[in-house]
Image (cartoon, rainbow, N blue to C red):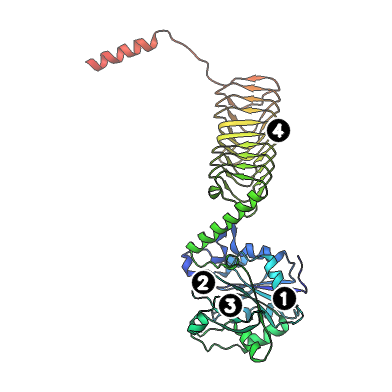
Amino acid sequence: MTSPAPFAAIILAAGMGTRMRSARHKVLHRIAGKPMLLHLMDAVDALAPAEKVVVVGAGRDQVEAAVAGRAKIAVQSEQLGTAHAVRMAEDALAGFEGDVVVLYGDTPLVKAETVARMLDRLHAEDAPVAVVLGFRPADPLAYGRIIADTDGRIAEMVEFRDATAEERAVTLCNSGLIAARAADLWPLLARIGNANAAGEYYLPDVVTLAAAEGRACVVIETEAAEVAGINSRAELAALEAAWQARRRAEAMAAGATLLAPETVWFAHDTIIGRDVTIGQNVVFGPGAAIADDVTIHAFCHIEGATVATGAIVGPYARLRPGAELGEGVHVGNFVEVKKARLGKGAKANHLTYIGDATIGAGSNIGAGTITCNYDGFNKSLTEVGEGAFIGSNTALVAPVKVGDGAITAAGSVITRDVPADALAVARGRQEERPGWAARFREKMRASKAR
């Protein structure tokens, strides 16, 4: 996607967000594992903007840290309305003569395609002064209204609290997003007053002032879900649910089977191949990539992990960052893998922890095995060769190497390297004392009888 001319994006993120009841800035609350502000910035970046400016206010340190190196910063010290907030970005864009798009950090799901449509409309033959993004919600509530003709030419825009009953009956609402040329935007903003019910400087007054001069502004529409804003935890949860529903539909349309779609949760960057089967209550954290023909059984958590073709995971498995499962690997119930690579066909089917390790192709990791990778200060590597067999309840005390084809006996604590094709036994020798149990019981019964 490209824009018809160089453009700058101004993202407003200065609001207090008091309804979130959070020490975290509102725009840094996460949708699908990513701060909502960064969702929006990624969409804008897809259009290669010439400039980006984030307008900050309360909690500015958090926002500045989140966007460091990705945008310029402008500060709105006083919350005097949206027009005032946009004006705070003027110095940051000094000398910029292209188009300007105004977006909101708490409206995270705006698509790059929609921003491109706004810019394209700005450069249409009739060359409107501004393009406003409108929508028609199921319940218009207290949104500002847009009065426009059938061609989208705007006659009036009005905030709900200033609207008449007739204006409130209009269903076309203002999302707040607007595109205009810098040469038009800054002079119009400078003329906006605050003679309204809230005593604020409203960005939509750009349209009103242009119309008073006989200069046309227009509206284009999008779906209400795309411009849904977040002001509370409940709205955050609702938008997360909407995002997940859309992502599940995309996964199934691309060839994945979700046995209980409503119970599967994706991250913003989850990659799912074709003919993948995902069971109930599976959660993907950021950084998960699943290849074709993988089966993920119920109740798995996968984050920062890659799973190759034909692997089987779960049920009740946890793949943590750095886990790499090779082709045809089996990782079963109550197995946790962290920063470890399992080679082709390796198996760890039961009750196992594998961390900071490499497991060779075709090796079998017995139930109850753990890699003892942390000594309280440092983490060390465990290396298991190809075709090795690690007996149940083996503790591999890193750093340690088990050679190709080697076997460790069940219950062993392996503290030294094991050569290829060797058997390692590291456990106490079993002893039997004939009749001891019967004598013990007789003694205890006699003691209790006294």
Which residue is located at x 54 percent, y 45 percent?
Answer: 260
Other residues around mark 4 within 10 Å, as few (<14) / some (14–19) / many (≥20): many
**Where is the N terminus found, in terms of image quarters?**
bottom right
First in sequence: mark 2 vs mark 4: 2
Residue at image mark 3: 76
Residue at image mark 4: 344
Which of labels 4 and 1 is toward the front? 1
First in sequence: mark 4 vs mark 1: 1
Question: Picture quarter containing residue 98?
Answer: bottom right
Which of labels 3 and 4 is toward the front? 4
Under circle 2, the secondary element is loop
* Mark 2 and mark 1: Cα distance apart in space: 33 Å
First in sequence: mark 2 vs mark 3: 2
Percent position of residue 2, x then y: 77, 67
Residue at image mark 1: 121
First in sequence: mark 3 vs mark 4: 3
* Mark 4 and mark 1: Cα distance apart in space: 53 Å
What amino acid type should be assigned to the residue bearing mark 4? Answer: Lys
Under circle 4, the secondary element is loop
Residue at the left extreme, as displayed: 450
Which of labels 2 and 4 is toward the front? 4
Residue at image mark 2: 16
Other residues around mark 1 within 10 Å, as few (<14) / some (14–19) / many (≥20): many
Which residue is located at x 77 percent, y 73 percent?
Answer: 4
Percent position of residue 46, x then y: 72, 64
